[in-house]
Amino acid sequence: MRLASAQNLSTATLRENANVFVESFDTPWKLPSLVRDLPAGVKEQHRLHLTASAATELVPPQVEFVVHWRDDRARMHEVLLKRRVPVVPHAELAETRAVKGGTFVWDLRGDEPLKHSPTWEMTWKGENLYMRVHVDDAVQCYAESKALDWKWGGLAGDAVSVAWAAGPKSNAESVQRIWVLPFGANGPELWKNSGVGEKQTALVRQENAEIKAEVQTQKEGYSVMLILPRKMVMRDEKRGETSCVMNIAVSDNDGGLQTWVRSWAKEELGPPGWGRVALRIPETQPAPPQATPR
């Protein structure tokens, strides 16, 4: 087992099968070396720790299992299994100062589109959270049907979704999710549902006027600007809690059957494995005492 690295792309076939837009090569993570010679039919379990030291958020590590096996004709074969390791990301937001992050393919299949992964920025000011998600996607696709067909990746169209819950111990039923469909006939459409992964509920229209979305289109893609009320996302703020767990996902469909999803955290993990978002609230200084006339 090893960390993914461009140095391992030693043949034309390996280089052709690598997707630099999706895979994580040469990340700053460290992994202990593990080489095992196993007889046929033997299974082993090992606990390994990935470590990294960095002041900023890291790209999730990608490990590769390289399996060499010999057939009954003494021919040697090699099988390469690629796996991205889920991590719990964090974002601490100071007022009016944007924090940036990325999205990732968590279950590598090998046939993902050759596109840059969407990126996002998030900040807060006053009573609102502000998010901007940029997507490199020149093909605009509106989902006429709002059904979520997970055999083909979920929603059959382009969308940006933001899901949140109060904390990592929240259950799936408490999750709220806003969907922005950027290419509606009359502009961006807002929908909502709840749940996690393939157990999400059906989409219904979002009627909350406090939630606002704008879309800017460019030649190479589009950007979604989303405004969410803090009181909706940080539901325990009255008790002094200014944090939540969140996931940001982008659905990409180019007019075919398959929809591709890239997200900040691995969706299937639910609130325990989603990103931690905390607001940095400046401490208020007490007013100086006023002199009282005698």
Image (spheres, grey):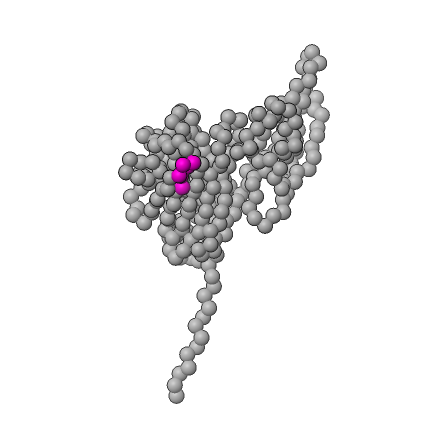
In the rendered image, the vertical position of residue 276 relative to residue 110, given as above or below: below
Asked if residue 108 can be seen in this view, the reply is yes
In the rendered structure, the answer to whether residue 258 lies left or right of residue 79 reads left
In the rendered structure, the answer to whether residue 292 lies left or right of residue 73 reads left
In the rendered structure, the answer to whether residue 172 lies left or right of residue 40 reads left
In the rendered image, the vertical position of residue 248 relative to residue 16, given as above or below: below
**Main SS of residues in magenta:** strand
Expressed as whole percent of the image width and height from the top left, the position of residue 53 reads 63, 47
Q: Give the range drawn in magenta.
A: 218-223
In the rendered structure, the answer to whether residue 294 lies left or right of residue 29 reads left
Expressed as whole percent of the image width and height from the top left, the position of residue 204 reads 31, 37
Q: Which residue is drawn at 43% across and 77% down?
A: 289
Out of 39 and 229, give the one closest to the viewer.
Answer: 229
Q: Which residue is drawn at 40% across and 39% down?
A: 218
173 part of magenta stretch: no
Expressed as whole percent of the image width and height from the top left, the position of residue 111 reads 50, 26
222 part of magenta stretch: yes
Say which quadrant the N terminus sits in: top right
